[in-house]
Amino acid sequence: MSSDLGTKYLVDANILISACRKFYAFDIAPVFWELIASHLGVDLFILDKVQVELAGEDSLAQWLDKQYARVPACLISTNDSSIVSSYQEIMQYVSKCGYYNPVGQQSWQDYTAADPWLVATAMAEGYTLITFEKPNNNLSTNRKSKSIKIPDVANYFGVRCSDLFEYMRRQKICFEK
């Protein structure tokens, strides 16, 4: 599989949290974090809303702060008219599509929630989203969901989603022997 030269990826917080806490802890897989750092600002980007979600005092937040200082271009701002316009379109879809109950709609109506902004940014700027969220294959207007999944909304708007491992394979990120 060839690398996706020119493809830009936007990462969901769950990717970094899962990598840090489940798969590639800093103390046992530092090479993973070095490889990811080498892609930041090149083909891998972090949304400002994700930065806020991940802010804190833990090792992931500290690592991210170092990366933002080292590669400021890896941080994407949602303060852009095309992104805001896409966000409004997404929010209108979520409220009118009939798949989501008020609890689900409310979860995305929080202006600080990163998920709708991820889809809006990818839609407006041509990113592929990297998330571990899976689509809800049982969406129905007869049984409204309380959980909005990034892949479902992204699919409706023609935004491509990938997971971490597909991204790593496409970009030929591997751990050397």
Image: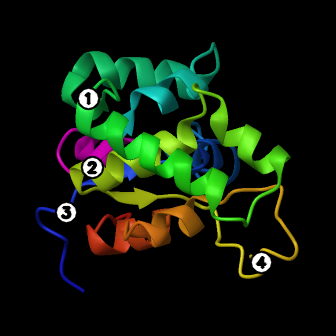
Quadrant where the image shows the C terminus: bottom left
Question: Is residue 32 among the parts visible in the rendering?
Answer: no
Question: Is residue 50 among the parts visible in the rendering?
Answer: yes
**Residue located farthest toward the bottom when viewing the structure as drawn:** 1
Q: Residue at x 24, y 86 (%)?
A: 1
Kindly indicate the quadrant of the structure image that contains residue 138. Answer: bottom right
Q: Position of residue 3 (x, y in %)?
A: 19, 73
- Three-letter amino acid code at the position of disc 2: Ala
Residue 117 higher or lower than 96, as above or below = above
Q: Which of marks 4 and 3 is in front?
A: 4
Q: Which residue is drawn at 65% across and 35% down?
A: 109
Q: Compare marks 1 and 2 and give the one earlier in the sequence.
A: 1
Distance from disc 4 to disc 3, alpha carbons, whole Å, reads 33 Å
* Residue denoted by label 1: 80
Label 2 crowding class (10 Å Cα cut-off): few <14, some 14-19, many 20+?
Answer: some
Please state the extent of the stretch shown in magenta in the rendering: 33-45
* Residue denoted by label 3: 7
Distance from disc 1 to disc 4, alpha carbons, whole Å, reads 33 Å
Q: Compare marks 3 and 1 and give the one earlier in the sequence.
A: 3
Label 4 crowding class (10 Å Cα cut-off): few <14, some 14-19, many 20+?
Answer: few
* Residue denoted by label 2: 124
Residue 147 higher or lower than 84, as above or below = below
